[in-house]
Image (spheres, rainbow, N blue to C red):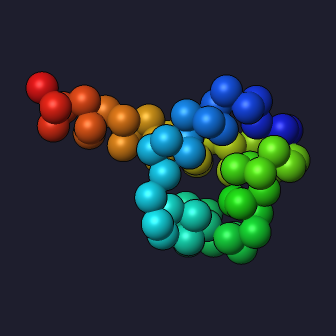
Amino acid sequence: MIVPKKIRDKWKLLKTGGDVSYIAGMLQISTRNVSRAFNGEPCSDEVFDAISEFYKKREEKIKTAAA
């Protein structure tokens, strides 16, 4: 699947150094496979789901800290 630009833009706002490596390590895949999702290239549903969950948790953590 190709991740819609709106979602990629949201991820990029939450992204910090090391995120791609961390997510790739969680899935035991290459960082290139994760980077594709950020660059608008095709990625697997597994990669999309992992990135989505990762940033969902980060966003919740930020909201909790700001409250």
8 relative to 27, above or below? above
Q: In this view of the protein, which residue sits in the foreground, 44 or 4? A: 4
Would residue 4 be found to the left or right of residue 56 on screen?
right
48 relative to 19, above or below? above
- Tell me if residue 26 can be seen: no
Instruction: Estimate the x, y position of residue 3 in percent, counting from the top left.
Output: 76, 36
Quadrant occupied by the C terminus: top left
Q: Residue at x 81, y 45 (%)?
A: 40
3 relative to 27, above or below? above
Instruction: Estimate the x, y position of residue 60 in percent, counting from the top left.
Output: 31, 33
Would residue 65 be found to the left or right of residue 44 on screen?
left
Instruction: Estimate the x, y position of residue 11 in percent, counting from the top left.
Output: 55, 41
6 relative to 17, above or below? above
Number of numbered discs overlaid on the protein picture: 0
Would residue 2 be found to the left or right of residue 52 on screen?
right
Q: Residue at x 66, y 38 (%)?
A: 8
Quadrant occupied by the N terminus: top right
Q: What is the quadrant of residue 20 in the picture?
A: bottom right
Q: Residue at x 25, y 30 (%)?
A: 63
Q: What is the quadrant of residue 36 in the picture?
A: bottom right
Q: In this view of the protein, which residue sits in the foreground, 28 or 36? A: 36
Instruction: Estimate the x, y position of residue 54 in percent, counting from the top left.
Output: 47, 46
- Tell me if residue 6 can be seen: yes
